[in-house]
Amino acid sequence: MQPKFAIPDFMKNSTAEEIHQRMMNNLPADIDDMPGGFPYDFTMPAALEIDEFINYHMTRALMICFPQYAWDEWLDIHGRQVHLERHPPESASGKVKVIGKPKTVIEMGTVFCTPATDTGPSIGFATTETAEIDESGMAIIPVSAVEKGISSNVPANVITLMAKPDRYITEISNPDPIKGGTERESNDDYYNRIAEEYANSLTYLGNDSNFIRWAKEAGAGDCIVIQAAEGPGTVKLVLVDRNGQPANEELVEKVYDHIVSPKDRSRRLLPTGSAKLICVPATTVLIDYTITGLIYDETTSIEQIKEDFTNTVKTVYESTKQKDIVRYNDVRHIISDIVGVIDFEEFFINGETENISLNREEYPETGTLDFS
């Protein structure tokens, strides 16, 4: 996470009022410095301009000089200096099952949809290859969301329509959730990768930190590294996406290709001593959180507290892969640190006040948040 920018001492005491007061103090003793007088009114506009220059333009100029404080396009420039690009938003992908007349051809780019609801519009998914319904009257077709972002992630059995109906197709469904849709990488997450690259840019030894960094470069949100998974020379990466969800097939393939580079060995990151890389999606463990007697002030709301908690608890999840445990006390204090929260009575993880143990290839996932 990016640290908060602290204004240097030489820029302090530079409000328009402070600057103007120094101007008045520097006037000769026989010159009128009272409000409404000509010297007072004549110099105040200059003080306002100097205030804006120091406290806005100069401050921003200093911030964009350093990746710790830069943002958006300025942070992108720092990323490119260490050969890292910000991850763009991604489309969710998966498969749909189509039932209809055998030998019906479904062209690449055909759009299947979820129904529109009171809370949101229909979501479209385009086929990524041409397919034909087989003799059994069924076809399984890979699809990718038309619009990118987390809104393109949908549960199983909600894709039931075609954008342009075909009379030879009688039934549409998605047996499994369509997932992998992510938003544009945030400034904090992008900065974390830049900082890691500065710290480790010359290390290609194949230790755990290298594999985690390479997986994130390919678009993963995090990964668990299991050395010698199938004996000496083998490494397994257990992957989640940037939403903390198990990686889909597309992301698993992207991470493998980025590290192994099977089509161009000159770009291979996998050390020669590692004969085999295995990439698999994580098995997630749902964790529900309950808080009673929550007291907060007017600067926040239940929705904002839930959002802040969800974002912050991800940092705790990242540390769990080293310990295989979600510690109750590591999570409980997050509530007290959220801006606007005054107090609360009880805090439960899965209805208990105990730690949650994880298997080596399991990754925690936030379930329901019952904050009352």
Image (cartoon, rainbow, N blue to C red):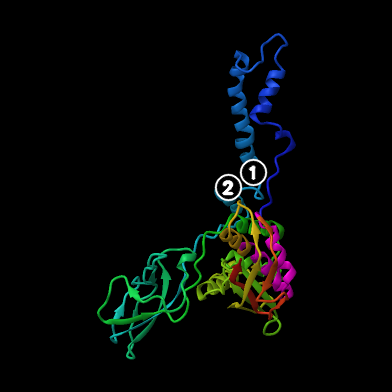
Q: Is residue 301 visible?
A: yes
Which picture quadrant has residue 227?
A: bottom right
- Residue 22, quarter of the rendered image: top right
Marker disc for residue 285: none
Earlier residue among tags 1 and 2: 1
Q: Amino acid at mark 2?
A: Trp
The furthest residue to the front: 293
251 relative to 17, above or below: below
Q: Which residue is at a point 45% across and 67% down the rendered structure image?
A: 152
- Say if mark 1 contacts mark 2, CB within 8 Å: yes
The residue at the far bottom in this view is 136
- Percent coordinates x, y for residue 160 in the rendering: 36, 77
Q: Which mark is residue 74?
A: 2
Q: Nearer the viewer, residue 129 or 289?
A: 289
Of 15 and 33, nearer the camera is: 33
Q: Which residues are magenta?
A: 311-340
Q: Nearer the viewer, residue 32 or 23?
A: 32
Secondary element at tag 1: helix
Asked if residue 274 is among those painted magenta in the image, a careful observer would answer: no
Residue density around tag 1, few if under 14, some if 14–19, many if 20 or more, within 10 Å: some
**Vertical relation: 193 (above or below) 92:** above
Left or right: 357, with 144 as reference point: right
User: Does residue 272 appear in the picture of this structure?
Assistant: no
Dividing the picture into quadrants, the one containing residue 117 is: bottom left
Q: Position of residue 162 (x, y in %)?
A: 32, 73
Q: Which residue is denoted by mark 1 in the rendering? A: 63
Where does the image place residue 252, in percent across and percent down from the top left?
55, 74
Residue at the (58%, 68%) spot, across then down:
220
Would residue 174 appear left or right of 76 to someone viewing this image? left
The main secondary structure of the magenta stretch is helix
